[in-house]
Amino acid sequence: MDKLIVTNFKMNLSKEEVLEYKKIVENSDIKNLIISPSNIYLDLMSSNKYDLCAQNGYYEDFGTHTGEVSFKQLKSLGVKYSLIGHSETRNMSNEDIPLKLKACINNGIVPILCVGNDINEKDTSKLFCILDKELKILSGLKINDIIIAYEPTWAIGTGVTPSLENIKSVHTYIKNVLSKVYNIKCKVIYGGSVDMSNIKEICSIEEVDGVLIGSSSLNPNNLLKMYNKIK
Ligand code: PGA
């Protein structure tokens, strides 16, 4: 199966840079690509070469929420996916994550739910308990399509990644829980310091359906080189 590449530009790149990015990607042979620019560039980045993903959204459809953008509004731009619960967007309580998940689903946007926060790889006894707790927000929701991103907070932007055994066992665990407990078949992707040096070995794990790439995806030529390593 072809692996999915999801980029996360975070709060980076200017209007000129995203337009240049789009041009380079459109002239390449890359497939299975999802791009998450800053929300302000989503419309500009629209292309039939890849799908668009929002980095976040607000759970109400409309209303008095200055500075927010709703999933309904994102959908009207042709956005197909949204990151939900990325560790850089979580607030202290995380109470809004189930609301965002619901709003995404109601508006026909596929959530890319980030889990794995605060998991310390060495503390394996706690690892599956934390995942169980994080995945509990799926109960009671009618989900047809979802992607789970395993993103241990300590691996984001640090240049450090979990061992391949850890990635494999967590992906297997998530897939099992989703199919047995929630009756959901889903893709599970890995995120956190994915770069040119490790993308190939991470994607060689059968259970890994793709990768979520932050800083290494900011340069389109790097992105294409990484794609060439796994295609
Ligand atoms: P990174 O970010 O690739 O820069 O570690 C990944 C993410 O935060 O999604």
Image (tube, rainbow, N blue to C red):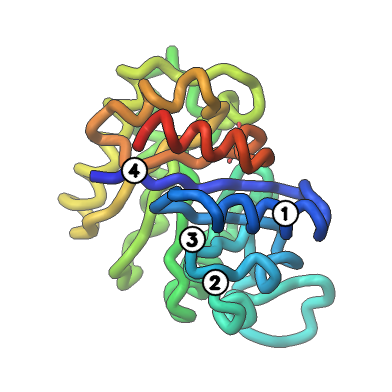
The reply to whether callout 4 and callout 2 are in contact (CB within 8 Å) is no
Helix, strand, or loop for circle 4? loop
Left or right: residue 90 versus residue 167 is: right
Whether residue 75 appears in this view of the structure is yes
Q: Amino acid at mark 1?
A: Glu
Mark before the other along the chain sequence, 3 or 2:
3
Give the numbered dot on residue 140. none
Residue 79 circle label: 2
Number of other residues with Cα within 10 Å of mark 1, as a class: few under 14, some 14 to 19, many 20 or more: few
Residue at point 39%, 53% (across, down) = 32
Q: Position of residue 148 (x, y in %)?
A: 39, 48
Residue 3, disc? 4
Identify the residue at image location x=49%, y=69%: 48
Q: In terms of image quadrants, where is residue 110?
A: bottom left
- Which badge, 4 or 2, is on the more N-terminal residue? 4
Q: Earlier in the sequence, mark 3 or mark 1?
A: 1
Residue 50, label in figure: 3
Instruction: Specify which label sits upstream in the sequence, 1 or 2.
Output: 1
Q: Quadrant of the N terminus?
A: top left
The amino acid at mark 2 is Val
Which residue is nearer to you in this view: 165 or 80?
A: 80
